[in-house]
Image (tube, rainbow, N blue to C red):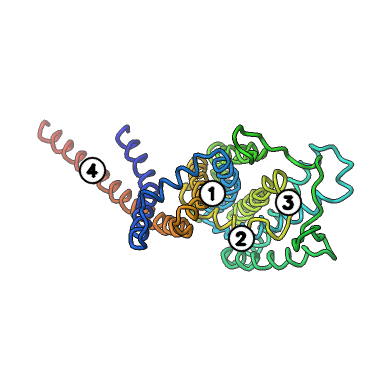
Amino acid sequence: MRTLSARSVLLGLAAPIGALLFSVLVCALILIISGHSPVATVDSMVTAAGRPRTSINSINSAIQYYLAAVAVAIGFRMKLFNIGVDGQYRLAAMLSAAMAGAAFMESLPGFVRVALTIIAAMLVGAVWAGIAALLKVTRGVSEVITTIMLNAIATYLVSYLLNPARLAESVPGSNNISTPEITEGGRVPGIEIPGSTSPLFGLVFLAVAVGFGYWFLFARTRLGFEIKATGLSESAAVASGVSVKKMVMVSMLLSGAVAGLIGMPQLLGSSHAYALDFPPGLGFIGIAVALLGRNHPIGMAFAALLWGFLDNSSNALDISGVPREIVLIMQGVIVLSVVVAYELVRRYRVRAEQRDVGRALSANKQDAKTEEVSA
């Protein structure tokens, strides 16, 4: 059992570590070909990451990436590809920001305002994901197609609503447009870190709670077990009395609800309004982080920190004369190599298990022959 456990751990780490090493090798070759030193590049990024402000910004980015990864991972557990996390997150952030900045919210206590904003974001994300789930269980439409289409619809819907004539207003002194600013009582104060001009998002504890809830759901509850079992084999789940349609609806609604939380650390801790410059693409980053972290709550946390480090330390490359696009190349190679590495590890694991079974059968036959001879 100890040998099997050790092998399982090694196989679990082989894919992400192998993908990282391969991406580093590819980027090193690109740097050498383009006339840059890989060692100097890494030194510049590590030096930048050592600065308190860059470190805090990396963690702040990782908080949002982690929430996006959990949203994607919930769908993965059910073998659903919720590629619409990005649209769910942006629509939820925009509508909850408009509500949080409304005049009627100012009369409410601060805790209530924050709670209502977060709940509203979760509801919007869940409803938007629920459309894809409803189409899948009633009409058999692939969630990949519907969530991609819903991403586009969410983009244009946000553009339509983010208008001074509707839910937004012009920002004085700029060409930017945003929802009404959330006043002091509706914000979540950041955590001041010595040496850093950027505070740590106060909703970092929300990300921790979501990660714990994700672990508890799939490790300690019947619902989580039924979702995983249905994802592994729908026929077996039906035979044991589990409703596949119910599991699809539940997993997509949960995924959408978590997707609605992605923009909350930025909205309530820094921006205080949804504007044209609100960070896009976080849902797609969540797919990469979930893949790299193997849908494990701790693995995704490390993957999110890695992505945050790469994003924020890339600014130092411009100063050292290295194109910052090398970081994008590394991230892209990581995603591609992770998929390949997981498949290679899966095939190796299957063959190893087959060999173990073969050895066990051979040992049993040998024992049986020995008993016959003794008799």
Q: CA distance from mark 3 to mark 2?
A: 15 Å
Q: Residue 238 vs residue 9: left or right?
A: right
Residue, disc 3: 123
- Asked if the residue under mark 4 is in contact with the one under mark 2, i.e. CB atoms within 8 Å, the reply is no
The residue at the point 64 percent across, 62 percent down is: 132
Q: CA distance from mark 1 to mark 3?
A: 31 Å
Instruction: Locate the N terminus by quadrant.
Output: top left
Residue, disc 2: 84
Q: Amino acid at mark 2?
A: Gly
Residue, disc 1: 312
Residue 142 in view, yes or no: yes
Residue, disc 4: 361
Q: Going from the N terminus, do you reach mark 4 or mark 3 first?
A: 3
Observer-nearest of 169 and 142: 169
Observer-nearest of 360 and 21: 21
Q: Amino acid at mark 1?
A: Asn
Q: Amino acid at mark 3?
A: Leu
74 w.r.t. 323: above or below = above
Observer-nearest of 177 and 214: 177
